Every structure is written in structure tokens, then in C-alpha cells.
Image (tube, helix red, strand yellow):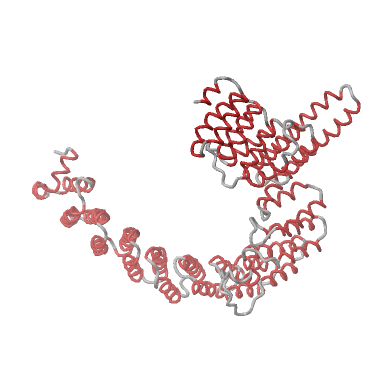
Amino acid sequence: MFLNHLMRQCKVTRTRRAFDDALRSLPLTQHDRIWKLYLEWAKSASGPTAVRVWKRYVQIQPDFREGYIELLHELGAYSEAARQYIIILNIPHFKSRRGKSDYQLWSEFADLLVSHPREIDYDVPVERIFRAGIERFSDQRGKLWTSLATYWIALQDFERARDVFEEGITTVMTVRDFTQIFDAYTEFEEAIISEKMEAAQTDAEADYDLDIRMMRFEQLMDRRAFLVNDVLLRQNPNNVVEWQKRVGLWGENKEQVVATYTNAIKTINPKKASGRFGHLWAEFAKFYEQGGDLKTGREIMEKATKVPFRSVNELADVWIDYAELEIRADNMDKALEIMALATKAPRVSHVDYFDETLTPQARVHKSSKLWSFYVDLEESCGTVESTRKVYDRIFDLRIATPQIVVNYANFLEENGYYEESFRVYERGLDHFSYPVAFELWNLYLTKFLARYGSTKLERARDLFEQALDGCPPQFAKPLYLLYGDLEEKHGLARHAMRIYERATRAVSDEDRFEMFEYYITKSASGFGVISTRPIYEKAIEVLPDKEAKDMCLRFADMERRVGEIDRARSIYAHGSQFADPRTNPEYWKVWYEFEVKHGNEDTFKVRQPRIAFPCLVFGWS
């Protein structure tokens, strides 16, 4: 009550002493009531008195330091506000009573320093504070570097600001931060140039300074692409694509191109490379090749083959690029030597291509990609015998692909080694099972029949039996059709019919209806339509209802054409069990038309229960 009375008297010194006496006299448990009035009075008193009161208060209640800082802002005591920010930021795990994060406090502090640089005392380590924030908040480095540079600009210390900008754009790790700093940097330079242009109109010395600044600004803009590239390489020094872009940025500057390639090769970790590291080596060698220094290009590629790449495939590409280097120089023999060296291996190799515990150099001889290139090169430049040796070596190492099998067989066929080409197919079939074997059998049988036709019929039959032994149902249809065609052209018709009959049992459910149709067609053309009756009966027995219904229609039509009306009627009656009138009205319509043409009143009446419903559907009387 006494303090409230004094606050209304407007006697500053007496009131302050009374508050101090109260705090000294009362126990700590009652100080909160006094401080509530004391802070209210200090705000009204303002000036140094308010600062001193709050300074004492935050010593016992440090959590309320943010309120003290707001007061200092209002009073313009920016140096003291900066010191309070330093105290807050040095408190580990400080929890703001205003819900502000650490970065928000840092941002407010930075704004204070930038907004009032001249009011901050020299004992406040501004630059050290900003650098501490840059280290602490890695995702906000762009803003903090820009703020530090803006601080020096506000103090008219342009050279230090420029140094800060340069340090920022050469150390940040993200393109976002770089763009933020670079845009501020260019705005700063443009502002300086604008001022110098106005001064240059009256001052010759200022005109000379303007030329220097213009040249500096142009260099800054020219460096932008390199600086962005630097940022991306700082993010990931193993990024092969960015190193390649850096080489392209140097254009015709050969010294820098060589230095960039050299630096990239030294920097990139082959096991962590992002991109084709081997392609970078090849481009380095090609650079010397285009410059006429083939010897140095060879030395580079020779070193590249010893690099512990991340994968065998990448090492194989390096060997291929090495050989292509010699091919471009028309050194075909040298290219063949390189490929022979790349594929050199023990006669019997037990190395597992996928064994990651071994180096790529120890597994590269199992690379089908490398062998494919080697064999293509031998076909183009070597002899038939040397090419066959390479193909045989591929088979010995058990790395032949279906394409290599086909290529080897075609190569032998083109050179007149027909039997050897057939043996290659057989070797390939030993390596592969279905479904790959289906394609090989298809090619093998087609070429065998085209070569020998009817001259080796028994051998052809043996091959077909081998192909069909264990053949999955989904691949059986083409082989049976080819087998049946062989018997029709060069064997016996009854053998062909037996093959087609086997096919109806061996093919998949999806192909069975078409196979029965084909079988019926061949039987009718060879032995007459009457011979197809047992085939129709078998088809109707084994096919699902939907397809059995269609087969009944075909069977009945065949009987009708040969004049067997009663048989046709019986077939229609049998097939009606597979055709629901609600979903298959076409079946009943065909039967109805049949009865109209070939029946009589008695037969129509006998079938009336079955056709009464479709009569209603179609509106027949």
C-alpha cells in the first residue's frame, strides 16, 4: 500500500529507495508481489532507472530476459540489448517464455546488429557472433552471411563486406544459400557502380575507379557458373556429372581442363562415385587423343584399368573404351591385344561374378558385356578360327547369353559350318531351360528344317521329341504346329494327325480351343469331314462350357452340311446345357433357325421347352 501511494507521488528517488527497502526487509516468498509493482513503476519511470531495475530483476529471474530486451529496444539501448542476447544464446537449452526457437532469437539478434550497427559498442564481437551462428545453423547460412555483409555495408566498410560475400559464396553447401548470397552481392556491386557513375560525371579519378568496379562486376557474373558448380561439388565431391560439367565450363582452356580432370580423379572415391567414373577416365584420355597425344591417352586408360571401381560393369566399360581408343586410331591388332588382356583368366575359373568380396579386376573376365565386345571385334577384324576360339571360351566360362548362342550359330552358318552351328544350339540348350530354351529350339528347328528338309527326317523327329520333352504347356503350341507341318510335308499324314492329337492334350487351356480347330481343319482336308466326328466329340468333352458350346455349333453345322439332320439336332440338344438363354441367346437363335429350316411341328414341339424362352426374347411367334 505504501509503495502504491509513493508511485502516485511521482517522486522517483524516494520511491526507488522504498522499493529497495521493501526487498531488503521482506522474505523472498513475498518478493514477487513487490517486483510486480517495481517493474510497473520502472516502465513508467523509463530511462536509466528502468534499465537498472530490470538488470537487477533478470539476475533473479533470468527467464524474463526477453522482456528486458524489449525494454532496451524501446529505450534505444542497443548495446545492452546485444549483450542480453549474447547471454541468452550462451545459455544451454534456453527455453523462451514467448515460444521462440533458437534460430528466431539468433535472427532477431542479427536484425538488431544489422539495423543499428553504429549504436553497438566495440566490445560486442559482432563478426564472431555471426560466424558462431553460421556454424550452428547450417540451413540458414545464406541469410546469416548476407546479414554479416550488410552489417559492414552499413558501417561503410565495403571491402570487408566484399570479403564476407566472397567467403560466403565459396563456403556454403546449398544452391539456395548460394543464390541468396550471390543476389545480395550483385545488388551491392550494382549499387556501388551506380554511385560511381554519378560521381564519374564530375571526377576523372572516379571514372577510373568505375572502370575497375565494372570489370570486377563482369568477372563476378562470369564466375557464377563455376561458383554454382563449386557448391554442388562441396555437397558431393564424388559427383562425376558435376566434374564433367566443370570440364565443359573451361571450354578451350586446355591447362584448366587438364587440371580439372586431374583434380577429379584424385578427389573422387571410386566406391562412392555418383555417375560413371570410368567414363570420366575415358573422356580424359580422349581429350589427349584429340590433341594428337595418343601415347598419353593410352597411359591414362592403362591407369584406369587398375582403378577399384564400384562394379565390374564399370571396369568392363573402361576396357571397351580403351579398345575403342585404338580402333579410332586404326590399330586393330592393338585393340585385339587389349581385349585379350582384359579377358585373360585361368582355363577353369571358379570366380563368382557377383562375389563383392573380390575386386572388379578379379571378376571382369566373367563379364558377358566385355566378351560380347571382344567377339564382335574378332568377327570384324579377326579370322574365323580366332573368332571361334573366343566364342568357345565364352562357353567354357559358362557366361554365354542366349544372344551369344544365336550370334555364334549365325556366324558359323554364314561361314558354311552348318553342323557346327547346330551343335552350338545344342550347347546353348544345355545351358538354358524354358522359357529361354523355347526361343533357341524355335530357331534351331527352323534352321534345321530349312537346311535339311526331308533328307534327315528321323533326326528332325528326334529333335522335336527332345524339344517337347518337359516343354511347359504355354510354349508347346508353336512346336507342335511346326512338328505337324514337318510330318505333313515330308512324313505320313497319320503321323501328323497323332501329333495334333497330342497337341490338344499338351497345350495350355488358352490354346486348346485353337488347337482343336486346327486339328479338325487338317483332319477334314486330309481324311474328309466324317473323320472329324471323334475329334469334335473329344473337344466337347474336354473343353470348358463356353468353348464346348461353340464347338457344338461347329459340329452341328458340319452334320447339317453332310445331311445328318438328326445327328445335328442331337448335338444342338446336347450343347444347350452349356448355353444359358439369358447370357447366350445366339446359341438358341441358331438352333431355332435350324428347326425352322429342317424341323417339323413334332420336332419343334419336342424342343419347345428349350426354345420357348428365346422365342420370347426375340419376339418370335
The residue lying toward the viewer, choosing from 506 and 552, is: 506
Q: Quadrant of the C terminus?
A: top left
Q: Is residue 20 above or below residue 568?
A: above
Residue 77 percent across, percent down from the top left:
67, 30
User: Residue 298 occupies which quadrant of the picture?
Assistant: bottom right
Residue 15 percent across, percent down from the top left:
58, 26
Residue 139 percent across, percent down from the top left:
62, 44
**Residue farthest to the bottom?**
347
User: Residue 166 occupies which quadrant of the picture?
Assistant: top right
Q: Name the side, left or right, on which 286 lies relative to 358.
A: right
**Residue farthest to the top?**
9
Residue 189 percent across, percent down from the top left:
77, 33
Q: Is residue 325 above or below residue 18?
A: below
Residue lying at 83% horizontally and 33% vertically, measured from the top left? 213
Q: Tell me if I can see residue 376 in this picture.
A: yes
Q: Is residue 510 above or below residue 456?
A: above
Residue lying at 83% horizontally and 25% vertically, measured from the top left? 197
